[in-house]
Amino acid sequence: MPNEELKKAAEAGWDEMSETYQRDSRISVDDVHYAPLGPGERELGLIGDVRGKHALELACGAAQNSIALAKWGAFATGLDLSKNQLAHARRLIEQENVEVNLVRGDAENLAMFRDEAFDLIVSSFGVEFVPDLGECFRNCRRVLKAGGLLIICTAHPLAAFEWDEDQKALIVTDYFHPPVEVWGELSGTGRKGLTFFRTLEAMTGLLADAGFALQRIAEPYPYALPEMTEEEKVEKIAYGGPFWEGMYERFSRVPFSIVYKAFKV
Ligand SMILES: C[S@@+](CC[C@H](N)C(=O)[O-])C[C@H]1O[C@@H](n2cnc3c(N)ncnc32)[C@H](O)[C@@H]1O
């Protein structure tokens, strides 16, 4: 399927799923999230001090990361394809009483931003829907200042595989070719979206080819959920809620997300 068709499907899909996603996931507006049930920026410290820095969030959804960055003193811009996700973002920004610039657009095409406009770019659970990630990373490099930071949190390649509940084991049929997830047909569009699971070799290759130096990879481990009170869950977990809690056992054996920290060279 051509990329433009895939992106139309992603847009239609996220417009359709936005309400359920925002209802079923509890996403913090006081932290940058990196993993379901796992630690975010407050604990991992991948980004550091953002005061006075210009930050772009790709595939921002309801812009919870951008809101947290703005609260920490950054000039934050969130970009997303989906108008319904951005409508949630507008409501949250108003509710949290912060300044965040929102842009409707495609993470592959950052032509709306001038060269070297940003000190840092972050993205959580967005690039797995972007078909031409090489193009996205090349544009990230263009809009980042020299030495700028790129934080990409995405689905771990092992998240592509089935979890066997009886055996409590992951069925890894072929790690080197993780399956592409095909979504159910989107109502009234005849379209189906895709989720791409990329191996570490593919991701680090795309980053290097686009002109980034990888500094660190994180595979965040979930908090000890059974030992936490409801209050502790709300306080600590930046990306949680009952939908994700149902997968605790899996997440404590196999990473669901992976974070790449890289710099523009
Ligand atoms: C799983 S949601 C994540 C949203 C947010 N980052 C979060 O963690 O809650 C994926 C988001 O990616 C957006 N998206 C998918 N493809 C995109 C593209 N090519 N450019 C910009 N946003 C895109 C969707 O609209 C959706 O809001």
Image: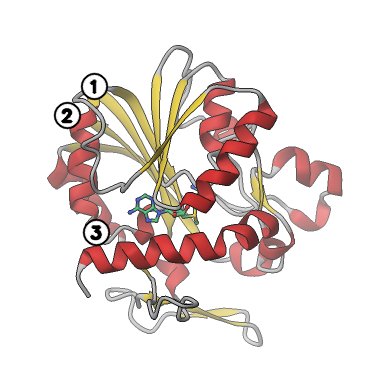
Residue 59 to residue 119: above or below: below
How far apart are the two marked residues, 2 and 1, measured between alpha carbons? Answer: 10 Å
Disc 3 marks which residue?
201
Which residue lies at the image location 46% right of the left edge and 78% below the top edge? 188
Residue at the limit of the structure toward the front, as seen here? 188
The tag earlier along the polypeptide, 2 or 3, is 3
Disc 1 marks which residue?
145
How far apart are the two marked residues, 1 and 3, measured between alpha carbons? Answer: 26 Å
* Nearer-the-camera pick, 85 or 44: 85
Q: Position of residue 178 (x, y in %)?
A: 34, 74
**Dot 2 crowding, Cα within 10 Å, few <14, some 14–19, many 20+:** some
Q: Is residue 167 left or right of residue 206?
A: right
Describe the element under mark 1 as helix, strand or loop: strand
Kind of residue at disc 2: Val
Q: Position of residue 107 (x, y in %)?
A: 31, 46
Q: Is the residue marked 1 within 8 Å of ligand 1, measured from its CB? A: no
Answer whether labels 2 and 3 touch (C-beta < 8 Å): no
The tag earlier along the polypeptide, 2 or 1, is 1
